[in-house]
């Protein structure tokens, strides 16, 4: 039998370490979710221990989607007592989305086991399944060695790539042999030329960022291909399934280096070496800014009405409202140009 609580009892749980709220006559213990709250933990402070039905159903504070409401059900612990329930009949939050679900998590995957060997079981439900996020711990590999390299804290990105960028910029100005010996050296660039080509590399990265996100990461793998489903989940599906996992938000250095090599080494045949280096340095600057922005819009609390506050709301809408639009993360530039802006 479900437990019942008074609003007074709910009010006794109003700290970040012990947080309850009431929504539409239901009581939720949201303590485990606060650090993962897409709007940032700070924004929740004044609402803890209260009935937030009116707040959560309006967009004046923080707009919530059906997906967010569905996630809320994971924290349901009981109901308000009958004497304190509202008189207005309301549909349960996220009920429409929950009704559309044709599965139960525990029926198709086992979250206590590595996910890559079982994600193919989702079959035709894969695209819908990954876009109903959960607040669970995800393990990809059985091997501890492989699992270690599948995760990355945010600070690894600048720690690894900033020295690489500085070295490449140095080589653009002062020259040096290519790692591919058949590529001849070319005249060194001036500081102004390096700045111009690096700026072009940053702009080029914004297009690569958009294109990878839209056409590769959001491609729907055929349910008949276990390999493609597994690869897609490893590349991006996992992020939509557990979007607030702090160790699966930035690209680990090893796969990032592989992608850089695939893009850069063939390009050396088409542009002079020094120019290619400056373009690569700019592209890597763009990449580092992208990854750090991605982490910040998930876990940071930007200043209200700032650029990053706008991008946070934009990216959260991509996750929780419409994953088929809003592919820009560091900027909306290509969403505007290619008409995929998420309003």
Image: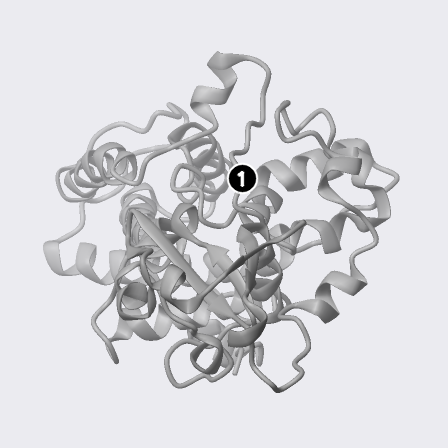
Judge by depth and name the residue closer to the eye, 264 or 55: 55
Could you tell me which residue is drawn at 39 percent across and 60 percent down?
A: 9
Category of crowding for the residue at label 1, using alpha-carbon neighbours closer than 10 angstroms: few (below 14), some (14–19), many (at least 20)? few
Residue furthest to the front: 83
Residue furthest to the right: 224
In x, y percent, where is residue 281?
27, 46
Could you tell me which residue is drawn at 58 percent across and 27 percent down?
A: 140
In x, y percent, where is residue 77?
55, 52
Could you tell me which residue is drawn at 27 percent across and 49 percent down?
A: 278
In x, y percent, where is residue 16?
28, 52
- Whether residue 148 is visible: yes
Could you tell me which residue is drawn at 43 percent across and 27 percent down?
A: 254
In x, y percent, where is residue 127?
74, 53
Q: Is residue 170 left or right of residue 250?
A: left
Q: Quadrant of residue 81?
A: bottom right
Q: Quadrant of residue 72?
A: bottom right
The residue carrying mark 1 is 136
Judge by depth and name the residue closer to the eye, 57 or 326: 57
Q: Is residue 193 left or right of residue 224?
A: left
Judging from the image, what secondary structure is the residue with disc 1 in? loop
- Whether residue 328 is visible: no
Is 30 drawn above or below residue 245 in the view shown?
below
Q: Is residue 314 left or right of residue 169?
A: right
The count of marks equals 1
């Amino acid at each position: 039998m479900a437990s019942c609580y008074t609003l007074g009892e709910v009010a006794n749980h109003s700290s970040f370490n012990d947080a309850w709220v009431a929504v539409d006559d239901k009581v939720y213990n949201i303590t485990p979710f606060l650090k993962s709250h897409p709007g940032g933990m700070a924004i929740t402070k004044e609402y803890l221990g209260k009935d937030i039905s009116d707040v959560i159903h309006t967009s004046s504070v923080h707009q919530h989607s059906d997906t967010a409401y569905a996630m809320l059900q994971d924290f349901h612990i009981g109901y308000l007592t009958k004497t304190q329930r509202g008189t207005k009949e309301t549909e349960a939050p996220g009920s429409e989305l929950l009704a559309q679900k044709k599965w139960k998590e525990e029926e198709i995957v086992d979250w206590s086991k590595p996910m890559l060997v079982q994600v193919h079981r989702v079959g035709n439900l894969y695209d819908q399944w990954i876009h109903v996020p959960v607040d669970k711990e995800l393990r990809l590999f059985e091997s501890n060695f492989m699992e270690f390299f599948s995760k990355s804290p945010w600070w690894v990105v600048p720690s690894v790539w900033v020295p690489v960028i500085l070295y490449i910029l140095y080589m653009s100005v002062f020259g040096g042999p290519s790692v591919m010996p058949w590529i001849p050296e070319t005249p060194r660039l001036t500081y102004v030329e390096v700045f111009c080509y690096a700026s072009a590399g940053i702009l080029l990265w914004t297009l690569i960022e958009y294109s990878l996100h839209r056409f590769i990461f959001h491609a729907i793998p055929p349910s008949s291909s276990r390999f493609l489903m597994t690869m897609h989940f490893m590349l991006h599906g996992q992020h939509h399934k557990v979007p607030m996992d702090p160790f699966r938000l930035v690209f680990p250095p090893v796969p990032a280096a592989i992608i850089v090599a695939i893009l850069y080494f063939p390009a050396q045949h088409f542009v002079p070496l020094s120019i290619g280096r400056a373009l690569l340095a700019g592209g890597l600057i763009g990449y580092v800014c992208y990854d750090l922005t991605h982490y910040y819009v998930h876990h940071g609390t930007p200043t209200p009405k700032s650029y990053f506050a706008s991008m946070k709301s934009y990216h959260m809408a991509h996750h929780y409202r419409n994953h088929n639009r809003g592919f820009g993360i560091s900027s909306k530039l290509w969403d505007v140009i290619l008409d995929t802006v998420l309003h």
